[in-house]
Image (cartoon, rainbow, N blue to C red):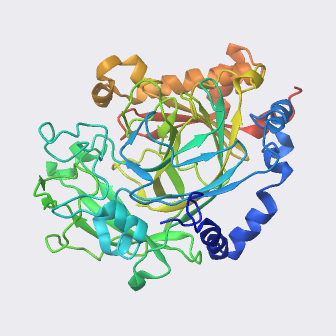
Amino acid sequence: MCKGDDLSCPHFELHYKKLKQDLNAERRGFLKGGLFAASGLATLGAGGISLVTPALAQATTSKLPAQRAYHYLPANAETVHWGYFSKSLKPRIEVNSGDIVTIESLTHHAGDDLERMVDGDEGAESVYLWTKEKKGVDRRGAGPTDPAKYKKGSGEGQGVHIMTGPVYVRDAEPGDILEVRILDCEPRPSGNPKFSGKSYGSNAAANWGFHYNDLLGGTKREVVTIYEVDNAGGKSWAEAVYNFQWVPQTDPFGVRHDTIDYPGVPVDHGLTKRNYDVLKGVRLPIRPHFGTIGLAPKEADVVDTIPPSYTGGNIDNWRIGKGATMYYPVSVDGALLSVGDPHASQGDSELCGTAIECSLTGTFQLILHKKADLAGTPLEELNYPMLETQTDWLVHGFSYANYLEELGPSAQSDIYSKSSVDRALRDAFRKMRHFLMTTKGLTEDEAISLMSIGVDFGITQVVDGNWGVHAVVKKDIFAARVA
């Protein structure tokens, strides 16, 4: 159904008018004040310190259409792809550089509590639909779709995130850089009237977690904790509602799942034992962010969403939230941006396997920087996803910077057995060294000294196949440096 986002709909104008009326007053004010503003490409940070130099901003602005457009991309069975990126996917919307788009994203863990996270939510219900006869979204992962070749389900769960998109950015070509500004990021309210004003998320201490083979007593178990978030904004924290230990679940197609091994399996809580006496008096600060934002890679047609790579993907850095800007190298025509894996909160490492997996809606401005304009700028040689905030620059290192290329034809299976923190730390070191030398004019010796005393290296995640380490440098370190 058109929600003001389908130009071909005969009732588009009516639906679009309703969409604008439904936007809350704060959002309307934000869009009115900033949507078409010429200052939309102003540089970030104190003193104008940004990866986008004034000259690059001017060159990029000169190529923008006279009017910016606003787009809305809902999440439903027609607009999501589950568990994979693909350069062959049909775009769900097309945008121009400078446009703003609001994108709904659904958590792939909503099946852990359908009552709180799916029931009454039309979009989520269409995605999670699963009866004996059909699934709302059949392929779930980058694995086989031939029933003769899979045992768990179509896609085999080799890739788990529900991705909304892709978004086609007009004129984007390989070698360009796509700047993605996260203007807003808010939890999706429960559609169930019983839980009005609340949002919910799931944390699974799962079999792929770093902890799994190191449990006290040696007893392996998977435990899911459901968290509540105040969607009205009155509280800035999440609180545990209950937890339960995973017990074998049989999906509607009759397949038994002894562990959490296939995305979207609806949990039958008639089989579980809920423990409501959990984390009492503990408030978890929420920091909503997107665990997986990325562009389609060129190396393969269907690519697992779990391991991150040079075009972004499942980076799982909690700093990629409201107010942050990401830069991604474009690999295919149109860039093909997809957004998913929304989180209410997460710590560095995502140690047990997941964050608080919670559906979110984000508003983004997409800005295309053409390859011809990048010479002499900090983005000229950027070949990995980079994060910029008001105060910091962050490079992302992985065990393999481009595992699809480095590991060859069997990369999507080999990556899970070859990752290490050591390799990711070395990649982050090399990227930060390059950043400091090329953008700040430091010698190698200067860069190494600065990294040891002024750059924080942290473990982004150790659960995504291609492990991650990020390096953070404060912008104000360079405040007195003469350009």
Task: From the viewer's perspective, tell me whether residue 131 is left or right of residue 453.
Answer: left
Determine the residue located farthest toward the right in the rendered image: 482
- Name the one closer to the observer, 270 or 38: 38
The answer to whether residue 243 is above or below residue 325 is below
Residue at left 57%, top 30%?
333
Count of marks, rendered view: 0
Task: From the viewer's perspective, tell me whether residue 371 is left or right of residue 276.
Answer: right
Q: Position of residue 379 (x, y in %)?
A: 70, 27
Task: From the viewer's perspective, tell me whether residue 375 is left or right of residue 451.
Answer: right
- Name the one closer to the observer, 214 or 289: 289
Query: Does residue 345 appear anywhere in the picture?
Result: no
The answer to whether residue 23 is above or below residue 363 is below
Residue at left 29%, top 54%?
205
- Name the one closer to the observer, 327 or 4: 4
Dividing the image into 4 quarters, which one contains the C terminus? Answer: top right
Residue at left 22%, top 59%?
134
Q: Position of residue 208 (x, y in %)?
A: 27, 44
The answer to whether residue 134 is above or below residue 62 is below
Task: From the viewer's perspective, tell me whether residue 438 is left or right of residue 263.
Answer: right
